[in-house]
Amino acid sequence: MKRIIALYGHHDCGKTATLNFVRELIRSNGGVSLSSIPPYSGDKPETFRYNDQIVCVCPGGDTGGIVRDNFNYAYSKNADIIITASRSRGASCDVISQEASQNNIKVEWIQKSYEYGLSEATQQLCNQEIAKLVFKKV
């Protein structure tokens, strides 16, 4: 693995929705899903070939166990890049930091927050903008 991109934030701030938008950006820009029955959504990880790299998008990340499973999934796919969700602190962050340290990889942390008081449509637009930021890093 060459790169770790971690989208972090508190529970229910739109990390999964944002990473599902990232999947769509990869698909619409020529990425080919290598998963058996795409397209996936929700927390299920998905693997793409994009720009001659293997990219695993792993939207689940609320616990250290889930993030550990995300890394195991990415290793099983020989991923060049993992994009995973994580909480703001605790075991999920610890797993990411450990993986980065063990593999001498710098984590690209991107904060995700829920903007209170926005309409659902506006929050979705925020999720889409963060997804574009994540996608540019791929």
Image (cartoon, helix red, strand yellow):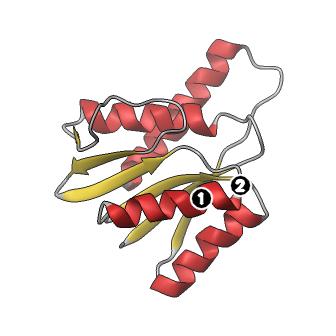
Q: Amino acid at mark 2?
A: Thr
**Front residue (pair 65, 47):** 65
Question: CA separation, marks 1 and 2?
Answer: 6 Å
Q: Quadrant of residue 34?
A: top left
Label total for image:
2
Q: Amino acid at mark 1?
A: Val
- Asked if 123 appears above or below 33 in the picture, the reply is above
Which label is found at residue 127? none
- Where does residue 108 sit, x and y in percent of width and height? 53, 64
Look at mark 2 in the image and give the residue it sits on. Answer: 63
- Within-10-Å neighbours for mark 1: few <14, some 14–19, many 20+: many
Answer whether residue 109 is visible to the viewer in this image: no
* Extreme residue in the right direction: 117
Instruction: For mark 1, give the secondary structure.
Output: helix
Looking at the image, residue 5 sits to the left or right of residue 66; the answer is left
Instruction: For mark 2, give the secondary structure.
Output: loop
Answer whether residue 99 is visible to the viewer in this image: yes
Residue visible at 65% across and 34% down in the picture: 14
| Mark 1 and mark 2 residues within 8 Å of each other at the beta carbon | yes
Which label is found at residue 67? 1
- Asked if 2 appears above or below 115 in the picture, the reply is below
**Front residue (pair 124, 32):** 32
Residue visible at 62% across and 54% down in the picture: 66
Residue visible at 40% across and 61% down in the picture: 74
Quarter of the figure that contains the C terminus = bottom left
**Front residue (pair 46, 50):** 46
Residue visible at 47% across and 45% down in the picture: 133
- Where does residue 76 sit, x and y in percent of width and height? 34, 63
Q: Quadrant of residue 130?
A: top right
